[in-house]
Amino acid sequence: MIEGYTHDQNQRHAYDMRQNYKRLVNSYIYTGFKQGKHQEKLGLAGKLRIKGMADEEIIGLTGLTPEDLVAL
């Protein structure tokens, strides 16, 4: 028991810590997912560019920005 807390306060604190942990884990999962999807789109854009597709078409198909294509 945390000193100065009642039993109910300790339970509330433990609950809050679990909820914060869950939010943190979900945030990391979501961020990793988004980054992975972005990398996937960049890979596809590179392949389409090699095949000779115009940048405007690549942007339309992948949803990437012109700045993303400059980095390729």
Image: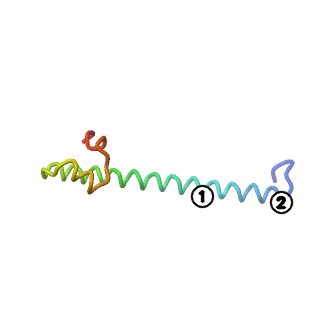
Q: In terms of depth relative to the viewer, which is nearer, 60 or 33? A: 60
Say what secondary structure mark 2 lies in. Answer: helix
Q: Which residue is drawn at the image coordinates 87% and 48% (left, top)?
A: 4
Q: Which mark is residue 8?
A: 2
Residue at the disc numbered 1: 22
Say what secondary structure mark 1 lies in. Answer: helix
Q: Which residue is drawn at the image coordinates 66% and 58% (left, top)?
A: 18
Q: Position of residue 23 (x, y in %)?
A: 59, 56
Q: Left of 15 or right of it: where is 48?
A: left
Q: Left of 20 or right of it: where is 38?
A: left
Q: CA distance from mark 1 to mark 2?
A: 21 Å
Q: Position of residue 30 (x, y in %)?
A: 47, 55
Q: If the image is split into quadrants, where does the N terminus sit? A: bottom right
Q: In terms of depth relative to the viewer, which is nearer, 3 or 48? A: 48
Q: Left of 65 or right of it: where is 46?
A: left
Q: Which image quadrant for residue 44?
A: bottom left
